[in-house]
């Protein structure tokens, strides 16, 4: 998804080269899955039993996680690209104004608003909310935006199998495709998810592999009138229990009566691409974990649910950098976060925004230096290369700390999702309830989460970084 965002930002912000031979910059997006290939589908095993094929799930944007919420910081970025894109994403989804936290015993542990006005980056003071939707819906909005704005031939369906870094000889980075074709690029943006091929090109095979969290998610959609807790409060509901976690929210405008649900549970072994999991068995597990929930909505969902997909969850270890020599990683490829953070997509959007802003600023300087004859390595190309290198360096410096802080917060919340004893369960409930009741304590323990997550400004960060460069050169 963010590959597309990156394109729209690059096209919108990055200046054309003054050299007529390379103006405007050529930007290609390669996507391994055609839309119709990516819908998670039930398959039938030899015995004719319905089983879940997870072959495509870990690699495709449209199926990884089934549905998701784009937080206010992500929504603001969509608006920055185009108010029409923002409107389209909002219209196909369900703006959640509140998060409601429940215990499986029926206690309401707390309610928090998702609304954020975004400080100075939203001078109109318009409040942004978390918008939940199916991934396929979000993906379609982004793809439509690219098709309508830049043409239908921009997104190309080809699988990348390898990326080779720029050589010291000055050779460009090379992208290798499944059919053996190769293409050179000044910059390869690896927005190819947690199992990134581009990351392998950057760090070498077997280095910095994603780590399985020990938990997997399942989810789906049921149809029928929305529960009052969701419809009346415009809410996403999170329930913590002794044997796992259960969430539900609408995945479409309320009138569509489409209730999305998801649940995580501990699974020691990773469901693998070669494994076919029995849907009936998964449903039995769901019933065992949540069938006695005090929330009738959960019991109702489970009674109707067809397990449509399973999502092993992966996180990335800390990388020493996110790019060099003509390659950069963004989104999950660089820093897959626990789904608990609810920030994976929004952090990918922030990456795309900041990377493009930096590239625009450094290239503008490179081109104006070329105009005045101030050239590195004696050429316009040398100036462009230096601009790219500076972009990658600043990109990591600006983004790394922010993402690390979000990862750490996710780890704290994940502890509350692991299997627990009854005593631990009630300790977690009491802890969460206290946090919600006494905001100052919560702020002391967890920080001012909304302000930190939603109030961050890419534009301000880029300005600061460039100003400090100017200072250090003065
Ligand atoms: C169960 C679950 C629930 C989640 N819930 C949320 C949520 O509510 N909110 C949230 O913000 N985040 C959530 N996340 C995290 C979120 O899904 C990711 O952080 C986000 O999708 C990352 O976007 P990305 O573009 O970096 O990677 P992806 O979305 O994985 O996209 C990668 C793209 O690259 C393509 N690709 C991969 N390999 C190749 C190749 N070799 N050649 C060409 N193309 C390739 C894929 O087809 C895909 O389109 C959740 C994750 C999970 C697992």
Image (cartoon, grey):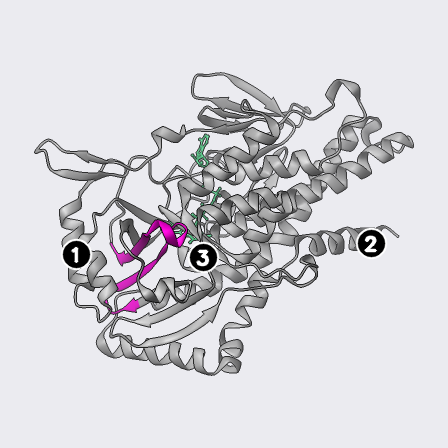
- Near mark 3 (Cα within 10 A), the count class, few <14, some 14-19 or many ≥20, is some
Placement of 85 over or under 184, stated as above or below = below
Is residue 193 in view? no
- In the image, residue 356 lies at what x, y percent? 66, 41
Q: Residue furthest front?
A: 255
Identify the secondary structure beneath mark 3.
loop
- In the image, residue 98 lies at what x, y percent? 45, 66
Tell me how far mark 2 sits from mark 1, CA to CA. Answer: 63 Å
Tell me how far mark 1 sits from mark 3, CA to CA. Answer: 27 Å
The residues colored magenta run: 240-267
Identify the secondary structure beneath mark 2.
helix
Identity of the residue drawn at 31% across and 58% down? 226
Q: Is residue 443 magenta?
A: no
- Depth-wise, is mark 1 or mark 3 nearer the camera? 1
- Near mark 2 (Cα within 10 A), the count class, few <14, some 14-19 or many ≥20, is few
Look at the numbered disc 3 and say if its residue's Cβ is closer than 8 Å to ligand 1.
yes
- Checking the image for residue 472, the label placed there is 2
Q: Is residue 390 left or right of residue 311?
A: right
- Near mark 1 (Cα within 10 A), the count class, few <14, some 14-19 or many ≥20, is few
Of mark 2 and mark 3, the one earlier in the sequence is 3
- Depth-wise, is mark 2 or mark 3 nearer the camera? 3
Identity of the residue drawn at 10% across and 31% down? 46
Of mark 1 and mark 3, the one earlier in the sequence is 1
Q: Are marks 2 and 1 in contact (CB under 8 Å)?
A: no
Is residue 2 in view? yes
According to the picture, the residue beneath numbered tag 3 turns out to be 342
- Checking the image for residue 303, the label placed there is 1
Q: Is residue 223 left or right of residue 369?
A: left
Tell me how far mark 2 sits from mark 3, CA to CA. Answer: 37 Å
- In the image, residue 308 lies at what x, y percent? 25, 44
Identify the secondary structure beneath mark 1.
helix
């Amino acid at each position: 998804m963010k590959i597309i965002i990156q394109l729209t930002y690059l096209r919108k912000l990055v200046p054309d080269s003054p050299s007529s031979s390379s103006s405007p910059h050529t930007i290609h997006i390669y996507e391994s899955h055609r839309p119709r290939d990516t819908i998670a589908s039930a398959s039938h095993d030899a015995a004719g039993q319905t089983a879940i094929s997870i072959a495509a799930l870990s690699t495709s944007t449209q199926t990884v996680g089934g549905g998701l919420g784009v937080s206010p910081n992500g929504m603001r970025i969509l608006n920055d690209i185009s108010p029409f894109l923002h409107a389209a994403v909002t219209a196909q989804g369900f703006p959640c104004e509140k998060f409601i936290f429940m215990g499986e015993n029926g206690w309401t542990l707390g309610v928090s608003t998702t609304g954020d006005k975004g400080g100075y980056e939203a001078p109109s003071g318009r409040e942004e909310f978390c918008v939940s939707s199916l991934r396929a819906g979000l993906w379609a909005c982004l793809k439509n935006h690219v098709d309508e704005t830049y043409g239908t031939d921009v997104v190309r369906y080809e699988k990348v199998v390898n990326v080779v870094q720029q050589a010291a000889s000055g050779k460009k980075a090379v992208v290798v495709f499944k059919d053996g074709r190769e293409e050179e690029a000044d910059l390869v943006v690896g927005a190819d998810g947690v199992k990134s091929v581009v990351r392998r090109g950057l760090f070498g095979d077997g280095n910095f592999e994603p780590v399985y969290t020990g938990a997997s998610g399942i989810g789906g959609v049921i149809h029928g009138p929305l529960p009052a807790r969701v419809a009346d409060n415009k809410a996403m509901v999170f329930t913590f229990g002794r044997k796992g976690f259960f969430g539900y929210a609408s995945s479409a405008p309320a009138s569509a009566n489409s209730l999305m649900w998801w649940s995580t549970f501990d699974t020691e072994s990773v469901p693998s691409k070669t494994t076919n999991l029995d849907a009936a068995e998964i449903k039995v597990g769901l019933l065992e974990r949540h069938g006695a929930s005090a929330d009738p909505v959960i019991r109702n969902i489970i009674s109707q649910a067809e397990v449509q997909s399973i999502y092993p969850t992966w996180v990335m270890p800390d990388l020493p950098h996110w790019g060099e020599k003509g390659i950069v990683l963004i989104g999950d490829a660089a820093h897959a976060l626990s789904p608990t953070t609810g920030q994976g997509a929004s952090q990918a959007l922030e990456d795309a925004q900041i990377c493009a802003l930096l590239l625009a600023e450094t290239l503008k300087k490179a081109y104006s230096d070329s105009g005045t004859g101030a050239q590195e390595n004696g050429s316009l190309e040398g100036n462009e290369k230096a601009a790219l290198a500076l972009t990658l360096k600043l990109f990591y410096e600006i983004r790394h700390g922010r993402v690390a802080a979000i990862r750490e917060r996710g780890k704290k919340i994940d502890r509350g999702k692991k299997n627990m004893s009854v005593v631990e369960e009630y300790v977690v409930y009491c802890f969460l309830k206290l946090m919600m009741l006494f905001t100052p304590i919560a702020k002391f323990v967890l920080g001012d989460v909304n302000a930190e997550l939603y109030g961050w400004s890419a534009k301000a960060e880029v300005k600061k970084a460039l100003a400090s460069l100017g200072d250090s050169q003065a």
